[in-house]
């Protein structure tokens, strides 16, 4: 392990220790349960609930209004856990693939699996048969629990229980009569295998431990306590019980972690089968949603939508932004239109089990463009990708993080694990970042996605923020376009506002006025939609292929 920072060596503003070249969290230290205590993430979440149980719904189906109370949810988890144990014969360490849109059954399945020490492996229901075969080869599940419309795409040699079938219902019936025996699961055991988004290559399977998830739950609990304390000191009422809308897929780390958090905090989760912008606005109005986790494109849509102004969104207190960097221009325009909604920005990875940094409280939330301050129990370094030198505040480099949330490694890929997590436990994020003098973290872009123009490095995210500030642009993405003279050209894919006559030259001129010459957009294509991952990340690989095929088709 690295040498400890000498006493008094940590700058109280930035958290930086000059002696060790390491940034430290300035958040109050979270109390974690002892490592030696056997515990699953599910058991820890349930132990956090009040007694008697919360009198609000645990889960609500946004489309139908069907609600599940906390007593019913816990009973459903126990019954299914019993069936998974006695009928399917699942044991601690066994992996189960869970493939379904975000329906009420999914949290029940996830918690039931974790409660008996089995490993949850949630997968995208929109994946192809080849992609499922790749996931199965990595995580080696013994069974799949799948939605009816997905089951046929799974490998035939994998046992599959169709969610909602008589066989599935029989698991809960059997489990109700024979609950599973108590199991001693170590916190270091794997709780979930989460698939990375694969925006730049094939997906990898990250093994996340119960300890990783418990550490995140402890941090969320302490943040809530801090917010309540600040409200009390200001003579204000504490925030109302949180009602979270889940446009996020539950198979993605952001949705998976937010669901775990919602249950542990005794809150209400409103689930959407799939994301639909207008349906999300309706759900916020109907269910008096207070928290909306979302990617930046949702904010852009709200800014430009007349529907968003017509709906009663007065219950909405916070929008939690993750999945991609949020530009200052978009944040400021949003705040001008929706002044009563707080934008909480955060940053995390599949490999960090969720949040690494976030803004807390109204003052921090005004640091537009930043993803906030380092979460408790975490250390970070900013490392020069060329020299390996650890850098100080204000200097850009690759972000490395270390702490109890860092994954165990990639399942079935020791080479990728060794390249991502070093022998001292530092997770190399692959993101170009910097900390400012006040300890706020800023994400510049993915290192692999920087455009190399004549030896200069151009961050696509910077150009996308500028493009999205144009009133006639609904959405935008910038990619590296191969060019034999300069290496790569910045190329913009643009979704125009309906009825707009915006031209390619106008797009290029708009950007050129705001950037150095080497950052200019050199090519433009108009498209109907930008391809994105379920978490809202731009699938640049698909756009590069599309751009190259455009030229090939003209030859």
Image: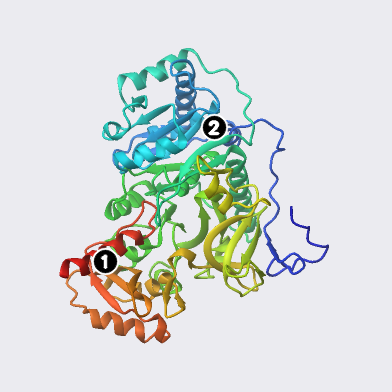
Q: Which residue is mark 1?
A: 548
Query: Hey, which residue is sitting farthest front in the picture?
Result: 484
Measuring from the top left, give residue 445's x and y in whole percent.
47, 67
Count residues near mark 1 (Cα–Cα under 10 Å), then give few for <14, some for 14-19, many for 20+.
few
Q: Is residue 500 left or right of residue 9?
A: left
Mark 1 or mark 2, which has the lower sequence index? Answer: 2
Q: Which residue is mark 2?
A: 53
Rounded to the nearest angstrom, the CA distance separating label 1 from label 2 is 57 Å
Residue at left offset 51%, top offset 17%: 179
| Most foreground residue, 308 or 435 | 435
Residue at left offset 40%, top offset 54%: 201
Residue at left offset 31%, top offset 76%: 470
Quadrant for residue 99, please give it: top left
Residue at left offset 26%, top offset 66%: 548
Say which of marks 1 and 2 sits in front: 1
Quadrant for residue 271, please give it: top left
Measuring from the top left, give residue 530's x and y in whole percent.
29, 62
């Amino acid at each position: 392990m690295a040498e400890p920072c000498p006493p008094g060596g940590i700058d109280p503003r930035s958290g930086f220790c000059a002696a060790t070249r390491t940034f430290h969290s300035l958040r109050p230290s979270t109390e974690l349960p002892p490592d030696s205590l056997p515990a699953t993430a599910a058991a820890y979440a349930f132990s956090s609930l009040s007694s008697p149980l919360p009198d609000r719904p645990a889960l609500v189906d946004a489309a139908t209004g069907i609600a599940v109370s906390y007593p019913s949810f816990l009973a459903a988890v126990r019954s299914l856990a019993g069936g998974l144990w006695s009928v399917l014969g699942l044991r601690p360490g066994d992996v189960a693939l869970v493939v379904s849109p975000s329906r009420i059954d999914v949290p029940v399945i996830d918690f039931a699996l974790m409660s008996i020490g089995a490993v949850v492996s949630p997968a995208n229901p929109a994946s192809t048969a080849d992609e499922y075969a790749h996931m199965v080869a990595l995580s080696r599940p013994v069974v799949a629990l799948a939605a009816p419309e997905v089951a046929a795409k799974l490998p035939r040699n994998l046992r599959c229980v169709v969610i909602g079938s008589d066989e599935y219902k029989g698991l809960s019936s059997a489990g109700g009569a024979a609950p599973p025996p108590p199991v001693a699961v170590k916190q270091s055991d794997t709780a979930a295998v989460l698939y990375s988004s694969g925006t730049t290559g094939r997906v990898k399977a990250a093994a996340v431990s119960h300890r990783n998830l418990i550490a995140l739950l402890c941090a969320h609990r302490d943040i809530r306590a801090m917010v309540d304390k600040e409200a009390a000191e200001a003579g204000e009422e504490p925030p109302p019980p949180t009602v979270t809308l889940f446009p996020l897929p539950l198979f993605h780390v952001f949705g998976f972690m937010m669901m775990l958090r919602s249950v542990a905090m005794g809150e209400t989760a409103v689930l959407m089968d799939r994301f639909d912008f207008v349906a999300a606005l309706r759900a916020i109005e109907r269910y008096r949603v207070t928290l909306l986790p979302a990617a930046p494109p949702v904010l852009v849509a709200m800014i430009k939508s007349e529907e968003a102004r017509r709906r009663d969104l007065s219950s909405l207190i916070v929008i939690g932004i993750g999945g991609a960097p949020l530009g200052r221009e978009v944040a400021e325009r949003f705040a001008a239109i929706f002044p009563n909604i707080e934008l909480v920005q955060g940053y995390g990875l599949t490999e960090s089990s969720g949040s690494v940094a976030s803004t807390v409280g109204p003052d921090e939330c005004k640091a537009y463009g930043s993803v906030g301050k380092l979460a408790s129990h975490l250390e970070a370094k900013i490392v020069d990708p060329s020299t390996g030198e650890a850098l100080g505040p204000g200097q850009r480099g690759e972000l490395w993080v270390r702490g109890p949330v860092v994954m165990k490694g990639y399942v079935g890929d020791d080479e990728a694990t060794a390249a991502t997590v070093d022998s001292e436990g530092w997770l190399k994020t692959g993101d170009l970042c910097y900390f400012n003098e006040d300890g706020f973290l800023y994400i510049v872009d993915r290192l692999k996605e920087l455009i190399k123009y004549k030896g200069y490095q151009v961050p696509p995210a910077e150009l996308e923020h500028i493009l999205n500030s144009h009133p006639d642009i609904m959405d935008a993405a910038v990619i590296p376009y191969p060019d034999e003279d300069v290496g790569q050209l910045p190329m913009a894919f643009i979704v125009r506002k309906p009825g707009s006559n915006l031209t390619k030259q106008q797009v290029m001129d708009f950007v050129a006025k705001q950037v150095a010459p080497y950052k200019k957009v050199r090519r433009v294509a108009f498209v109907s939609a930008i391809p994105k991952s379920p978490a809202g990340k731009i699938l640049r690989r698909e756009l590069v292929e599309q751009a190259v095929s455009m030229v090939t088709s003209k030859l």
